[in-house]
Image (tube, coloured by chain):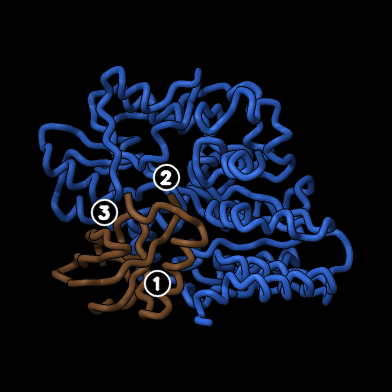
Amino acid sequence: MNLLNKFKDPKLCLNILEQVKHEIQGQFRFMEVCGTHTVAIFQSGIRTLLPENIVHLSGPGCPVCVTHDREIAAYLELAEKNVIIATFGDLIKVPGPGGRNLKMAQAEGARIQVVYSAFDALQLAMQNPQDKVVFLGVGFETTAPTVAATVKMAKEKDLDNFSVLSFHKLVPPALKALASDKDIQVDGLLLPGHVSTVIGLDPYLFLTDEYNMPAVIGGFEPLDILQAILIMIRQKSQGHASVINNYKRVVNDAGNLRALQVMREVFETSDAMWRGLGVIPESGLALRKDFENFNAFIVHEQDLPDVKNVPGCKCGDVLKGLISPDKCPLFGIRCTPASPVGPCMVSTEGSCAAYHKYSI
Amino acid sequence: MCLAIPMEVKSIEDNVAQVEVGGVKNQVRLDIIDEPAQVGDFVIVHAGFALRRIDRDEGLETLKLFQEGLGLELVK
């Protein structure tokens, strides 16, 4: 058997599962904070195989899902101005106030262009010098360095028709908000594999130092995920907590220093609004003053409109693990992947979309 | 959108690599990779940029994870 198949080998997985059942003492609530983990856990069936005394929660790990209503309203407003909006495809179907989304704006004449990378948006600006191109920056520490590198290129080229509306968010401050929220009661965190590729181990150490919470950087195979759960259970039973890198084949403990440097050169931290979690201090990334010519908030005088939440949508409670998706009154009735009400159902990485796909 | 996809480096010119996965070819920028990639290496790609070089075996292993484990579309 080659190494590849071992990560899915049912026998190995069942062995780990048996160890989990043998060693577990008490009730635990574990949370993953990466949309790809959410999908992997549903698809592999791990959720249904775990013993009943483990509750596995899907946290705020999908960038689209945590995009706040006010942020959605801002980019819908911007789309009405005389600009070309360049965006990742995930965002165009996310409904904002009144159920309106970018796709509808596009149908009514707004110029919306789906791009694969921030660099594609930059190229769009270079190809259309008579137009203003705005890139909608969403995503975590995996995406932010790619946008930062693009903004640096725009500055080097002295472009005057490219800007970024930055709603980038940082994972560790959100984990801190979760860890310190008494209502949520998470006993351990499955940390995101690819965000960790950029930030490394250190930004998570507060979880163990301040909250005595086990935390494991995990891969996406069934074996990876079960191993992470076993590590967390062992830490709980031994009464100590540490941050473990269980995805060393991809994640370097130190992270990607070059990506971090580029990100810090272009962005500074700012307070940010998260759907469901509210304002989290220093959890967002805003363009530094040196790059204000590329800051769409300044260039296009865009602010964050005050809006009311979508009535009935419980995405916020789902993201905090307070309810499972099927406990939302809209789930599967008014809110489906074909006709989503909230972002957790829009994104394929969203908890509600995964739950809908694999549980119904 | 947070996926990081491993792709094989086929050629490199300036700061752009031609990469391929599953028969799909693409270009990725090397501006934020932390160690230089060579032809034949795999790189973890996220949103058009290489995030990390990984050696061939690791690349194949990780790729398998995406293709079979998650059944996701690899490249748009």
* Residue A301 placement (x, y as % from top left): 32, 29
Letter of the chain shown blue in the rendering: A
- Does the CB distance between marks 1 and 3 fall below 8 Å? no
Question: Would you name the residue on which mark 3 appears?
Answer: A150
Q: Nearer the viewer, residue A90 or B72?
A: B72
Q: Amino acid at mark 3?
A: Thr
Q: Name the residue located 74 percent from the left edge and 48 percent from the top edge.
A: A181
Rendering quarter of residue B41:
bottom left
Q: Earlier in the sequence, mark 1 or mark 2?
A: 2
Question: Would you name the residue on which mark 2 appears?
Answer: A138
Say what secondary structure mark 3 lies in.
helix
Alpha-carbon distance for marks 1 and 2? Answer: 21 Å
Letter of the chain shown brown in the rendering: B
Pinpoint the chain carrying mark 2.
A
Alpha-carbon distance for marks 3 and 2? Answer: 14 Å
* Residue A219 placement (x, y as % from top left): 55, 67
Crowding at mark 1 (Cα within 10 Å: few <14, some 14-19, many 20+): some
